[in-house]
Image: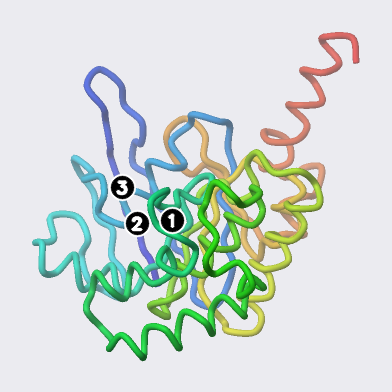
Amino acid sequence: MIRARDVHFSFPGREVLHELTIDVEESLTTVIVGRSGIGKSVFLKCITGLLRPQAGSITIDGEEVVNAGRAELRSIRRKIGMLFQEGALFDSLNVKENVAFPLVYHKSATPREIDMKVDSYLDLVGMRDSATSMPQELSGGMKRKVAIARAMILEPRYLLYDEPTSGLDPASSAIVESMIKRLQEERAITSLVVTHDIDLTRFIADRIALLEDQRIIAQAGREDGFREDSPIYVHFIKNRERIRAENGY
């Protein structure tokens, strides 16, 4: 389980997270929703140790991430796969090399084992035929699929997704949404997704948490979260409808 307690994070002159607390339950997909720029991506980077909170605790299977040393952090990160916004593939590496990168970095397999494992995961996401393609030759949806394969290659217990459908056309979004749901159902992977995409949330979420005012202010299961009297619905959906109405639409 991923547990965050009273997490504080600030950039110079701007507080981003204040007393953020949440449990990411095992074998479920938890979706954190909130406005753009509210701190959702910052929180994911705190979980992985890419950013260090100024206060609070984040534990993964009981291991503390905040203030972890380099060796401890390296061990913790092996449990986590992360899909960055827009995939974040390495432009100088082809598809197969991108997916292999975590295995090469962690020196956790022989070259032959790496080849076999990469081919297996490219098959899983339907990208085997594009193994030698460069990122600039791929569509947005194809890049996300490759990024998912790379995030999974170390067989992590946890997958973190940062705006996985941002900038994609509806068909590509549907492919990525279906893949996230299938991985959770078939492999019981614990997933944490941050997004402002209502359709994605409605499709994949087991649990929904609302990030507002620098903290998690409401949590609910999917059905309860989309009830019209739910704080999540009021803040995240009804508020949008109100703004449209105020602008004459």
Which quarter of the figure has residue 19?
A: top left
Q: Mark 2: which amino acid?
A: Ala
Q: Mark 3: which amino acid?
A: Asp
Q: Position of residue 44 (x, y in %)?
A: 40, 50
- Relative placement, left or right, of 35 versus 198 is left
Marks 1/3: CA distance? 9 Å
Evaluate if marks 1 and 2 touch, with contact meaning CB atoms under 8 Å apart.
yes
- Relative placement, left or right, of 186 versus 238 is left
**The N terminus sits in image quarter:** bottom left
Task: Identify the element where label 1 is drawn.
Answer: strand
- Relative placement, left or right, of 229 versus 135 is right
* Residue that badge 3 annotates: 6
Give residue 22's mark. Answer: 1
Q: Residue at x 26, y 27 (%)?
A: 11
Give residue 4's mark. Answer: 2
Give residue 185's mark. Answer: none
* Crowd class of label 2 (few under 14; some 14 to 19; many from 20; radius 10 Å): many
Q: Mark 1: which amino acid?
A: Ile
Q: Residue at x 38, y 72 (%)?
A: 100
Task: Identify the element where label 2 is drawn.
Answer: strand
Q: Residue at x 40, y 52 (%)?
A: 90
* Crowd class of label 1 (few under 14; some 14 to 19; many from 20; radius 10 Å): many
- Mark 1 and mark 3 lie on one chain; the one further toward the N terminus is 3
Q: Nearer the viewer, residue 43 or 77?
A: 77
